[in-house]
Image: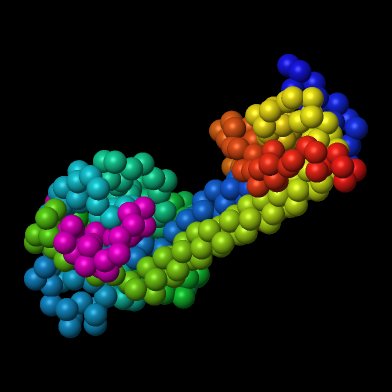
């Protein structure tokens, strides 16, 4: 208690020095909390935006004629619909957002269109994910932009497809792709219309980047698919996959550089302040040593001061960093900004790690303080 009292009195006497030390710790913690909290939002934002680029994997029957596949746009072979359930049942795969699909070209109102049947996306057993794509309900259909514009079809209209009447659930925005000339319906409706019950010709998916590996991603995907579905093969849409991976790495590399830089600068700041504090208190140190106080007592004054600075500065820094993240985060991250919340686990980290951080920065000045000869110190003052 006596040591703590001396630390408090010294802090009140040297308010500027104590305040600057407090500022250094608070700044380090505030910036770390802000960048960490904002970094989590950035990861979510990056994942959401890159996810919206679209599904980047196409799983098709292994015996597909690839020349015709690239010419037509989909496989002329089929595989059991059960394949998507078998793939979803495997854990630890780099596949997510599994979308069973059946595509056929057909004539509709004198125009060749692409009929697409899908089911709601499926998630792997070890992950739960929000869907990326629309899923038509039984008896309903979605029309591509060009078809809806050309034939004046609007929501709640009815259309006839291969003898089946479907209600238009909505029309899709212009995409500049084959989607504009497509009609999307529920998979089982399409299977019944083209008389291929229980069959699909493609599973669309997303390459999950939650598994880090030094190996080529496509090589890993093919090995995993071979064990789960040996009668299928996977194609990767490389531009989308590469863009997602590069953007994710960019965010991680940015945080890996900025946070250590902040820590080093603030540690140097605290070390300089601790050194100045030792020089200012040379006379005080000499008197304490002359009165018989040992090195442990002198060291406890400086390290205890650093601990107090760390605890108070850590709590203050957490409050400031969280306030900055909550204030400016939603302005930067438009998609996921509203999901930013205080990370109270960082408060525990702040009040535990900040004193250790401040104490580490004060180690060298403390060593200089305890090794000073009191006779020399008092003679020079």
Residue 25 in sight here: no
Q: Report which quarter residue 19 is drawn in.
A: top right
- At a point 74% along the width and 40% down the height, the residue shown is 373
Residue 220 inside the magenta-drawn segment: yes
Q: Report which quarter residue 315 is drawn in.
A: top right
- At a point 63% along the width and 55% down the height, the residue shown is 264
Depth check, front residue: 89 or 292: 292
**Number of labelled discs?**
0
Depth check, front residue: 158 or 316: 316
Residue 356 inside the magenta-drawn segment: no
Q: Residue 276: x, y in percent?
A: 81, 48
Q: Residue 289: x, y in percent?
A: 76, 31
Q: What stretch is highlighted in magenta?
A: 198-225
Above or below, 238 relative to 266: below
Left or right: where does residue 145 sit relative to residue 117?
Answer: right
- At a point 25% along the width and 48% down the height, the residue shown is 92
Quadrant position of the C terminus in the picture: top right
Q: From this viewpoint, which residue is outermost toward the top?
A: 1
Quadrant position of the N terminus in the picture: top right
Residue 239 in sight here: yes
Left or right: where does residue 334 sit relative to residue 177?
Answer: right
- At a point 81% along the width and 35% down the height, the residue shown is 286
Q: Residue 93: x, y in percent?
A: 24, 52
Q: Residue 325: x, y in percent?
A: 68, 46
Depth check, front residue: 376 or 161: 376
Above or below, 206 relative to 279: below
């Amino acid at each position: 208690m006596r040591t703590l009292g001396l630390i408090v009195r010294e802090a009140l006497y040297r308010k500027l020095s104590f305040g600057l030390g407090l500022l250094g710790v608070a700044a380090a913690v505030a910036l770390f909390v802000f960048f960490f909290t904002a970094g989590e939002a950035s990861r979510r934002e990056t994942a959401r935006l890159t996810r919206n680029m679209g599904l980047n994997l196409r799983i098709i029957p292994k015996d597909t004629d690839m020349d015709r596949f690239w010419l037509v746009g989909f496989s002329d072979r089929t595989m059991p619909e059960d394949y998507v359930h078998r793939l979803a049942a495997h854990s630890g795969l780099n596949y997510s957002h599994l979308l069973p699909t059946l595509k056929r070209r057909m004539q509709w109102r004198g125009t060749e269109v692409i009929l697409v049947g899908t089911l709601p996306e499926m998630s792997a057993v070890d992950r739960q994910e929000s869907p990326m794509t629309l899923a038509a309900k039984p008896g309903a259909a979605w029309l591509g932009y060009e078809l809806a514009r050309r034939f004046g079809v609007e929501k709640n209209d009815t259309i006839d497809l291969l003898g089946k009447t479907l209600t238009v659930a909505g029309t899709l925005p212009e995409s500049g792709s084959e989607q504009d000339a497509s009609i999307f319906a529920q998979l089982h409706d399409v299977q019944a219309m083209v008389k291929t019950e229980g069959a699909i010709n493609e599973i669309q998916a997303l390459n999950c980047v939650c598994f880090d590996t030094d190996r080529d991603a496509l090589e890993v995907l093919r090995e995993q698919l071979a064990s789960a579905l040996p009668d299928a093969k996977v194609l990767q849409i490389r531009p989308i996959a590469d863009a997602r991976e590069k953007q994710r790495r960019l965010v991680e590399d940015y945080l890996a550089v900025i946070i250590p830089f902040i820590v080093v600068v603030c540690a140097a700041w605290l070390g300089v302040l601790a050194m100045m504090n030792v020089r200012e208190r040379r006379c005080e140190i000499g008197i304490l040593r002359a009165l018989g106080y040992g090195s442990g007592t002198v060291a406890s004054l400086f390290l205890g001061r650093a601990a107090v600075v760390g605890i108070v500065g850590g709590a203050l820094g957490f409050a400031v960093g969280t306030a900055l993240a909550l204030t400016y985060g939603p302005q930067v991250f438009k998609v996921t900004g509203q999901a930013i919340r205080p990370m109270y686990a960082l408060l525990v980290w702040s009040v535990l790690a900040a004193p250790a951080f401040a104490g580490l920065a004060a180690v060298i000045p403390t060593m200089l303080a305890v090794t000073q000869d009191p006779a020399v110190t008092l003679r020079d003052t």
